[in-house]
Image (cartoon, grey):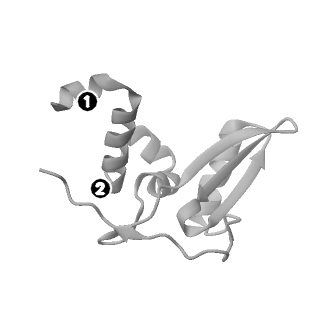
């Protein structure tokens, strides 16, 4: 079966390809976001913990929290998570960026499990 045949099977093949690319740690090409939020971009766009080691990507989530925006960051493989709240979405993103820049983001760490670090996948030829 050719690659084009696999793409036409169903969405699972697209998820598989996305997972392969995530394992190779390819940064997104979004200069506007990178300029507005360089610290957040760095966390979300690069999951390397060492030159040849990666963890699962950091996840950014947002939700309504009693009329305010709750913006959370979590890295399940490192058992690290935290969030900020603001009355506006833009304010929440700005607060995340400011706290990441000053190293005051309210990260919490759970030590129930060991971090899950894996080798950086090499491109398949």
Cα distance between the residues tagged 1 and 2:
21 Å
Question: Element type at marker 1?
Answer: helix
- Percent x, y of residue 28: 36, 44
**Looking at the image, which residue is at 39% across and 34% down?**
12
Residue 74 versus residue 117 in the image, above or below:
above
Q: Which mark is residue 24?
A: 2
Count of all numbered marks drawn on residues in the image: 2
32 left or right, relative to 40: left
Nearer the observer, 20 or 51: 20
SS label for mark 2: loop
Q: Are marks 1 and 2 in contact (CB under 8 Å)?
A: no
State the residue lying farthest toward the front.
1
Q: Is residue 125 above or below residue 47?
A: above
Quarter of the picture containing the N terminus is top left
Residue 41 image offset from top left, x and y in percent: 47, 51
Residue 64 pos. (x, y %): 78, 36
- When asked about the image quadrant of residue 100, the answer is bottom right
Answer with the quarter of the image where residue 91 lies: top right
Q: Is residue 13 left or right of residue 96?
A: left
Mark 1 vs mark 2: give the one in front. 1
Report which residue position mark 1 lands on: 6
Nearest to N terminus: mark 1 or mark 2 = 1
* Residue ID at (66%, 38%): 90
Q: Residues within 10 Å of mark 2 (few under 14, many from 20)?
A: many
Q: Is residue 74 visible?
A: yes
- Front position in the image: 4 or 25: 4
């Amino acid at each position: 079966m050719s690659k084009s045949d696999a793409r036409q099977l169903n969405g699972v093949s697209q998820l598989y390809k996305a997972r392969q690319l995530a394992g190779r740690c390819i940064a997104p090409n979004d200069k506007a976001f990178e300029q507005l939020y360089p610290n957040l971009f760095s966390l979300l766009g690069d999951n390397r913990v060492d030159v040849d080691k990666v963890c699962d990507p950091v996840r950014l989530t947002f939700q309504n929290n009693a009329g305010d925006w709750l913006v959370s960051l979590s890295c399940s493989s490192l058992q690290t998570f935290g969030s900020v709240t603001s009355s506006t979405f833009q304010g929440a993103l700005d607060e995340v960026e400011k706290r990441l820049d000053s190293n005051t983001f309210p990260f919490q760490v759970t030590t129930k499990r060991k971090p899950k670090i894996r080798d950086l996948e090499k491109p398949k030829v």
